[in-house]
Amino acid sequence: MGTFHHDKGELHGITVVVVTDGPELFVGRCDTVTPKHVVLLDVEAHVEGESAQSRDEYLERVSMVGQRGNIPRVVVPTERVRSLKRLAELELH
């Protein structure tokens, strides 16, 4: 059985982590994945070096308590995406 929004990609509606080629990563509900971009909704961003938490510490916290979703929508160009994974599938130490 497929999803109602079959044109949005298999991750539609799933909380994902997008790691970029820069210092930022985004955690949010995946809306659309296309060859040109990834669209996330209800997003929380982490920028390495802007807080006391490392990227791994941040992801560990988010995986335990969830993301705040303080940014309504983020569009990440595909060429900036280093990885795109379901939050539930992250292997944290």
Image: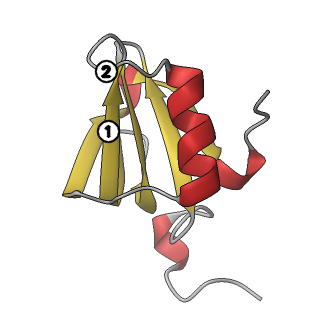
Image location (x, y in percent) of residue 4: 54, 89
Indicate whether 60 appears above or below 71.
Answer: above
Q: Residue at x 73, y 40 (%)?
A: 90
Q: Residue at horizontal 31%, vertical 21%?
A: 51
Q: Position of residue 17 (x, y in %)?
A: 52, 42
Residue corresponding to mark 2: 51
Q: Position of residue 35 (x, y in %)?
A: 43, 41
In the figure, is residue 17 to the left or right of 80? right
Query: Residue 11, relative to residue 89: is it above or below?
Result: below
Task: Left or right? Give the position of 56 relative to 90.
Answer: left
Give above or below for 25 relative to 29: above
Question: The disc labelled 1 sits on which kind of residue?
Answer: Ala
Classify mark 2: residues with Cα within 10 Å, few (<14), some (14-19) or many (20+). Answer: few
Give the x, y percent position of residue 85: 63, 42
Q: Is residue 17 left or right of residue 37?
A: right
Mark linked to residue 72: none
Task: Report the Cα–Cα distance between label 1 and label 2.
Answer: 11 Å
Tag 1: Cα neighbours inside 10 Å, few (<14), some, or many (≥20)?
some
| Residue highlighted by disc 1 | 45
